[in-house]
Amino acid sequence: MHESHDAVAGHYDHLDRFYRQLWGEHVHHGLWTDASASSTEAVQELVHQVAHSARIEDGTRVCDIGCGYGAPARLWAAAYGANVTGFTVSEAQATFAHQQPVDGPAPEYRLQDFLENDLPDASMDAAVAVESLTHIHPPSDVFTEVARILRPGGRFVACVWMASPSPPQWARRYLLDPIQTEGRLSTLPTDARLRHWAARAGLTIERLDDVTPLVRRTWSIVLQRFLGAVFTDPAVLRTLLDPSESERVFARTLLRIWIAQWMGVLRYGWLVARKPQSSRNHRVEPLVRRLQ
């Protein structure tokens, strides 16, 4: 268990209460394919679109890399009948996930680093990583491990925090580098780096789209909730004012992320890749029309 693993686990365990207060059970962005959608609808829309890209259906064996509190896994089980195996390094997240009811095949939640999994070769139909790839060190190894556990023709869908190809030096110094450090991220890759990792692992990328305009409303909502919590929840204010609180810097990170996404230096990538078939050609389907 390496330092990055411990830092990520400690971050989410320590801020467990605040994450659920600000985000709820789905600790990820919303996807506004419909501008009139509520934040709850947008969050669920992202999970449904991941299912579409991964071709999740009844009986699909899904590996959820960085499953968080298990909300996406429960949705895929209830709405699609998927059999989900989720990995998280946060004990608080795993405990919460195990306590939640599910309407459908019960997901299996593992308190384990995905890179240390013991899943058999070619045992999964799909693998997904919703905003978890950059928490894992090294992220390039995730692609290699995904290629191992996927059956031929299996699909990998990742929602990835990315850096723009050539951000100005000031943006890297005051936005991207602090976001990476304060958010316990191993890196912020460019789309070119993601393509390189996928190719080296033997995966074929079908789509790698920048969908930042469809997700960045998330941070306006989170900032509003955070400011509301500061004035209504004494525990939040105590955390911010406690000089011994190592994770209080995350309050600054919220604003940095909001600025970085609107400036275009922090991007949200939608990656769809597959493990090639050994004996026949694979028909490439476009990403769901509403994301184009």
Image: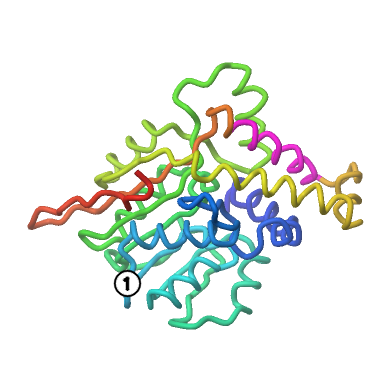
Residue 71: image x %, image y %?
55, 68
| Nearer to us in this view, 50 or 117 | 50
- At a point 55% along the width and 40% down the height, the residue shown is 186
Residue 166 magenta: no
**What colour scheme does the image use?**
rainbow
* Quarter of the figure with the C terminus: top left
| Quadrant of the rendered image containing residue 266 | top right
* Quarter of the figure with the N terminus: bottom right
- Label 1 secondary element: loop
Q: Which residues are magenta?
A: 246-260
Residue 249 magenta: yes
- At a point 69% along the width and 51% down the height, the residue shown is 11
| Nearer to us in this view, 135 or 266 | 266
Q: Residue furthest left?
A: 279
Is residue 277 toward the left or the right of residue 33 in the image? left
Residue 12: image x %, image y %?
67, 56
Is residue 3 toward the left or the right of residue 269 in the image? right
Residue 178: image x %, image y %?
67, 32
- Read off the residue under disc 1: 57
Total label count?
1
Q: Amino acid at mark 1?
A: Glu
* Circle 1 crowding by C-alpha within 10 Å: few under 14, some 14–19, many from 20: some
| Nearer to us in this view, 100 or 198 | 100
Is residue 120 toward the left or the right of residue 213 in the image? left
